[in-house]
Image: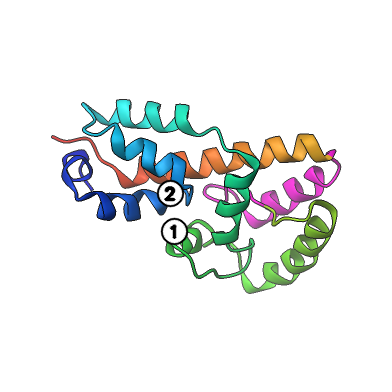
Amino acid sequence: MRLAELNTMEAPDAARVLRGCADVDRWVAALLVRRPYADRRTLLDTAHLLATWSDAELAHALADHPRIGERGTGPTTATSAREQAGVTDADREAFREANRRYEERFDRIYLVRAAGRTAAEMLALLEQRLTHDDATELAVTKQQLTEIAMLRLETLVEEDR
């Protein structure tokens, strides 16, 4: 989508598009009220500055995210499926067990930027993150949501020509 399209879309349509990057009402609303964006870089910089997730916003965003190795049903499902394309059926069983241990330890799903990572890399990161204390892992999870949202937005919006 061209930046001009995002700048001129009706607010509900633009909100639906942005929600596909991160399902966080405050972030989406803040991006909408700052339209129009002069250029793609301004949009991306603004989105990054606004990506300061509260614990409640993180919990809401995680409710939409499918577990690594699973399929979801929310606004970010199609994007998540593309990002997890490298996860094979053989990997799914390993993720099932690893996800269970992570959720037991931190009481939320394991969130990791899947794009550009292999299943083995994501599993290794999960194992490493299981060693974190609660505060460290919460900060890492928020940072991963930022990486995911920004990558999705960068992929979504093209500079006008």
Is residue 38 on the magenta stretch? no
Residue 114: x and y, percent?
Answer: 57, 51
Which-is-in-front pick, marks 1 and 2?
2
Q: Is residue 89 above or below residue 76?
A: below
Q: Nearer the viewer, residue 78 or 26?
A: 26
The residue singled out by tag 1 in the image is 79
Lower position in the chain sequence, tag 1 or tag 2: 2
Instruction: Give, as a three-letter code, the residue at label 2.
Output: Cys
Q: Which mark is residue 21?
A: 2
Residue drawn where x is 48% and y is 47% of the image? 24
| Tag 1 near tag 2, CB within 8 Å | yes
Q: Position of residue 79 (x, y in %)?
A: 44, 58
Element marked by disc 1:
helix
Give coordinates of residue 137: x percent, y percent: 75, 40
Going by the image, does 29 lie left or right of 128? left
Looking at the figure, which quarter contains the C terminus?
A: top left
Residue 119 relative to residue 124: left or right: left
Q: Secondary structure at mark 2?
A: loop
Residue in front for this viewpoint, 34 or 2: 34
**Scheme of colours in the image:** rainbow
Residue at (59% x, 60% y) in the render = 63
Q: Residue sitting at 69 percent across and 37 percent down?
A: 140
Residues in magenta?
A: 111-133
Point out which mark residue 117 bears.
none
Of residues 5 and 13, which is closer to you in this image?
Answer: 13
- Which kind of residue does numbered mark 1 sit on? Thr
